[in-house]
Amino acid sequence: MDSLNIQGILLSSRLIIGTGKFASFEQTHDAIVASGAEMVTVAVRRTELRSDKESLLNFIPKNVKLLPTTAGCYTADEAIRTCYLAREAGLTNLVKLEVIGDSKTLFPDVEATIQAAKILVKEGFIVLPYTNDDPISAKKLEDAGCAAVMPLAAPIGSGLGIRNPHNIIIIKESVKIPVIVDAGVGTASDATIAMELGCDGVLMNTGIAGAQNPILMAEAMKLAVISGRKAFLAGRIAKKMYASASSPLAGVI
């Protein structure tokens, strides 16, 4: 089986989706099911973590793994404390690390992200950091002990698709850990392109939750990721400047 392996965590689906921005908890549940995702993100600072209350956690299918995130954190210390909170709440040691550097663009503070990653790894967390589409940063995060890197395709929620495909390819060549595109995916073709570039997975939220029909878009994203992965494994034809006949004339009298 062609599974995504994140430090021993095996996922048959290479699509990870966020749980924010949906119209209701019921819609969140239905989108998760339609997407086929086996892992979803949960913003620790924006989610009621007590299951005895009206909580998002009650609407996530039992077979789906949680990926707590430090969304909304602007310093390494804030992000580290949020990860401790998730662990103390009994969620998991697996965390998506976000340290935002700018409130307008939501670009990551890479220096603070690396700083936080080093500490969290030493404390036994499995760290998946959100980062720029920069091969050097990705390599430093791998060296810090991260289990994967999550370079943005475009600014969070922008739906612009992959702005720097060559950088994504170089990141994939530079690190041995999984590369999961995070942020900027707007539609199914964006997800397919990410997978065709050789990415190991795609994480998205707004592209599904913000669609006119989120449930249908969730299913489309599921198929897009599967299609892109199959195309990558199949190996595309080389691009050429000129035509090449589908029915060669060689040997025709």
Image (tube, rainbow, N blue to C red):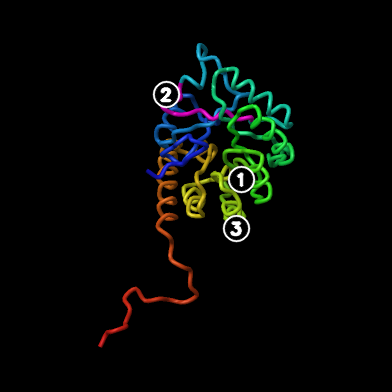
Q: At label 3, which amino acid type do we have?
A: His
Which mark is on residue 152?
1
Quadrant location, the N terminus: top left
Tell me residue 126's x, y (percent): 58, 32
Q: Earlier in the sequence, mark 2 or mark 1?
A: 2
* Foreground residue among 55 and 197: 197
Q: At label 1, which amino acid type do we have?
A: Leu
* Foreground residue among 25 and 151: 151
Identify the residue shown where x is 43% and y is 76%. 243
Tell me residue 42's x, y (percent): 55, 28
Left or right side of 5 for 115: right
Check residue 61 for magenta coloring.
yes
Q: Earlier in the sequence, mark 3 or mark 1?
A: 1
Residue linked to disc 2: 62
Q: Is residue 202 above or below residue 92?
A: below
Residue linked to disc 3: 166
* Foreground residue among 28 and 112: 112
Q: Earlier in the sequence, mark 2 or mark 3?
A: 2
Q: Is residue 231 above or below residue 35?
A: below
Q: Which span is picked out in magenta?
A: 59-70
